[in-house]
């Protein structure tokens, strides 16, 4: 079965099964359009889709319904780990394992160890922020079918894209590209893997 | 680009454009990427040759030091810190401007930072590398530098965590690591831009690996922005702590001229002052050479001059305060230490420092002089010279003239000291030139967010764009507004898994 949409330069087919169709890619030219489209798609009930842009779009989180990330809690955990880890480290090494008396200072005193504890807190929290962000985003992911699209290369330059996954329950091979066009997409393309 | 628009007005009714020359998104991308994509210029090759030659000299000096011993330096018994620690404090200080721009100005929503933050952060990392090298080789037996870290070893000994010198290891180590993470994370989207524009397979793979597969997904951007904000919030106390900890090396000792509580804020202000001077020293030639005048505009230069002036005045205040405290303390040794700085054998250092840090920046009060780039450049160079001499004065005058005249001795740098100082600039500029050649020198994604058309809320209920707002622009492509807002609930979030 093959379907040709009117005024489409791209044919969306299901006949040839060899490359598997995994998503539909649509290109937008302005921030206005992509945010409007995102909001409409969310209202329409799409769930497995994403917008791609060269920079973070103000207001897109609300338009798409992105839940706030748990990253801050992970960072809090990382920071607390650094804090108590360093507290333990300074106590264990200087006061417990090898009590080291120097200049008549007490072998264990909190003020003298605050700089170390502070630095370790910041270090662990920062490492958690970076690697937590990458982990939650499932990066690095060097292979992505989206990179096969020549058009998609402009996503890091000046264009905005909406990608709807075929596994989305609302996805319809005929209607979804039409919907995207009606929302202002200048081009609709299939993504195959 | 010949005639620049004046965007330095302080009138709040005028919105100063941060990107000039009528650049659009693609224009920004082209301007920045061209620097990394075009053929290597002759000017770059010559500069790189000079820088790497000095790096070679530094390497030879370190080799000589390792095979001979610390006697190759002018360090002696009272002045056992000498040039290596002067250079260490100098380079750590330089780094502070980068973190201030990337973290503190970010938290304060100073959008102008986007034009300069990338290479200021790069400057920070390279300065920290230069800084970390000096104590590393100053320990005398650098192959035992691992004693600085709490590693279990055959002696069953641990580092002494109550020592400010060990605090330094942790402060500078954390600072270097966090600065690098901040810089790299911010660069990932821009590396993806270079990946997507690359014409050869090698470039595509090289940039592609470091871009980590970034697709600009807004689900990713959401976490990215949150991570960036958290890093900024963490880096802010960190940057203030680093030079404070460095100043503890001095302040916790009992030497006259060092043992003062003013040191932490004084050092931090001095570091920001010297660091911004270094950003200007790098930015003024870079915007000419790389054609970045539309992104690093006169307003950026102007703002940096103002920060230099403000922090410079704090430094002047600290200088005055030190003298006042010495006088007010009625402490014989403290008073002598400061009179000795001005009239003692190192008087030339004090006068250089005072001229460069207290007098020269006063020219920045005048807007006309801030517009003359050669004036700004000269003042910035002088500020760096002044800040180096400040550290020289603090370290050398106090060490060579302590409580007992019988332990006084003069410090004279050797040729190796001077070559190593110059060589550290070779290391710094080699790294910086490589960065300019291969990486995105301006944070493109961030610059795009401060351009006027990046903000749109076209369809929010009840929102009408106000033509009288300064960021108003007419938009023909605006989609027809529809009225299906009935089901629109802006608050209810939706569980949306990312597409596989």
Image (spheres, grey):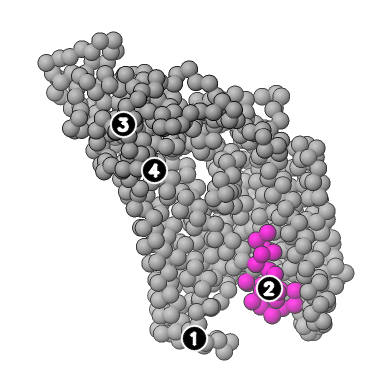
CA–CA distance between discs 3 and 1?
68 Å
Against B81, residue A70 (above or below) is: above
Report if residue B487 is visible in the image. Answer: yes
Report if residue B207 is visible in the image. Answer: no
Viewer-side label of 1, 4: 4
Of the pair A45 and B67, the residue shown nearer to us: A45
Of the pair B252 and B81, the residue shown nearer to us: B252
- Dot 4 or dot 2, earlier in sequence: 4
- Dot 3 or dot 4, earlier in sequence: 4
Q: Are marks 4 and 2 on the same chain?
A: yes
CA–CA distance between discs 3 and 4?
27 Å
Q: Give the residue drawn at x 59%, y 24%.
A: B22
Give yes or no for contact between labels 3 and 1 (Cβ–Cβ under 8 Å).
Answer: no
Give the numbered dot on residue A107: 1
Q: Chain of mark 2?
A: B
Give the numbered dot on residue B486: 3
Mark 4 = which residue?
B222
Give yes or no for contact between labels 2 and 3 (Cβ–Cβ under 8 Å).
Answer: no
Q: Dot 2 lies on which element? A: loop
Give yes or no for contact between labels 2 and 1 (Cβ–Cβ under 8 Å).
Answer: no
Q: Chain of mark 1?
A: A
Q: Dot 1 lies on which element? A: loop
Mark 2 = which residue?
B261
Viewer-side label of 2, 1: 2
Q: Chain of mark 4?
A: B
Q: Is residue B405 in the magenta section?
A: no
In magenta, the rendered stretch is B248-269
Q: Are marks 1 and 4 on the same chain?
A: no
Viewer-side label of 3, 4: 3
Q: Are marks 2 and 1 on the same chain?
A: no
CA–CA distance between discs 2 and 3?
63 Å
């Amino acid at each position: 079965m093959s379907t040709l949409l009117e005024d489409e330069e791209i044919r969306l087919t299901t006949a040839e099964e060899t490359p598997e169709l995994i998503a539909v890619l649509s290109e937008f030219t302005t921030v206005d359009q992509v945010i409007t489209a995102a909001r409409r798609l969310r209202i329409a009930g799409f769930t497995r889709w994403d917008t791609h842009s060269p920079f973070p779009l103000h207001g897109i989180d609300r338009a798409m319904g992105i839940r706030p990330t748990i990253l801050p809690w992970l960072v809090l955990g990382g920071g607390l780990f650094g804090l108590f880890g360093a507290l333990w480290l300074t106590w264990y090494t200087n006061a417990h394992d090898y009590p080291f008396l120097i200049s008549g200072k007490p072998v264990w005193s909190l003020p003298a160890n605050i700089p170390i504890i502070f630095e370790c807190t910041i270090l662990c929290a920062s490492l958690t922020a970076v690697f937590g962000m990458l982990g939650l985003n499932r990066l690095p992911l060097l292979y992505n079918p989206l990179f096969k699209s020549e058009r998609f290369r402009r996503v890091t330059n000046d264009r905005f894209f909406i990608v709807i996954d075929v596994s989305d329950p609302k996805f319809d091979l005929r209607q979804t590209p039409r919907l995207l066009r009606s929302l202002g997409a200048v081009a609709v393309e299939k993504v195959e893997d | 680009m010949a005639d620049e628009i004046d965007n330095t007005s302080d009138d709040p009714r005028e919105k100063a454009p941060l990107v000039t020359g009528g650049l659009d998104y693609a224009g920004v991308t082209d301007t920045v990427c061209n620097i990394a994509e075009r053929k290597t210029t002759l000017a770059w090759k010559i500069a790189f040759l000079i820088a790497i030659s000095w790096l070679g000299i530094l390497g030879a000096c370190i080799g000589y030091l390792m095979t001979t011993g610390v006697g190759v330096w002018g360090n002696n018994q009272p002045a056992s810190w000498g040039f290596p620690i002067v250079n260490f404090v100098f380079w750590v200080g330089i780094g502070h401007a980068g973190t201030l721009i990337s973290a503190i100005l970010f938290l304060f929503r100073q959008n102008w930072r986007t034009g300069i933050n990338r290479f200021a952060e790069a400057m920070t990392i390279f300065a920290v590398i230069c800084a970390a090298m000096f104590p590393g080789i100053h320990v005398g037996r650098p192959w035992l530098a691992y004693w600085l870290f709490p590693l279990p070893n055959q002696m069953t000994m641990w580092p002494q965590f109550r020592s400010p010198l060990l605090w330094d290891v942790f402060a500078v180590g954390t600072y270097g690591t966090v600065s690098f993470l901040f810089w790299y994370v911010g660069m990932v989207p821009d590396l993806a831009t270079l990946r997507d524009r690359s014409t050869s397979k090698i470039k595509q793979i090289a940039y592609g690996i470091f871009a980590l597969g970034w697709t600009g997904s807004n689900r990713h951007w959401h976490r990215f922005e949150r991570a960036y904000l958290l890093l900024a919030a963490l880096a802010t106390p960190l940057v203030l702590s680093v030079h404070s900890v460095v100043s503890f090396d001095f302040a916790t000792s009992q030497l006259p001229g060092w043992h003062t509580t003013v040191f932490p804020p004084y050092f931090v202000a001095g570091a920001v002052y010297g660091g911004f001077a270094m950003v200007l020293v790098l930015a003024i030639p870079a915007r000419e050479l790389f054609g970045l005048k539309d992104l690093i505009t006169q307003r950026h230069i102007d703002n940096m001059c103002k920060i230099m002036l403000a922090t410079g005045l704090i430094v002047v205040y600290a200088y005055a305060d030190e003298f006042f405290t010495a006088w007010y303390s009625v402490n014989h040794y403290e008073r002598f230490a400061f009179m000795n700085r001005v009239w003692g054998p190192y008087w030339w250092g004090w006068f250089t420092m005072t001229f460069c840090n207290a007098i020269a920046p006063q020219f920045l009060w005048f807007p006309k002089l801030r517009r003359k780039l050669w004036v700004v450049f000269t003042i910035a160079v002088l500020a760096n010279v002044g800040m180096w001499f400040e550290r020289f004065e603090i370290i050398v005058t106090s060490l060579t003239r302590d409580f007992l005249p019988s332990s006084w001795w003069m410090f004279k740098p050797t040729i190796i000291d001077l070559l190593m100082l110059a060589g550290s600039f070779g290391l710094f500029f080699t790294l910086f030139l490589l960065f300019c050649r291969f990486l995105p020198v301006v944070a493109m994604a961030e610059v795009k967010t401060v351009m006027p058309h990046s903000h749109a809320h076209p369809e929010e209920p009840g929102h009408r764009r106000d033509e009288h707002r300064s960021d108003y622009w007419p938009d023909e492509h605006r989609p027809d507004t529809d009225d299906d807002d009935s089901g629109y609930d802006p608050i209810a979030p939706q569980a949306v898994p990312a597409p596989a």
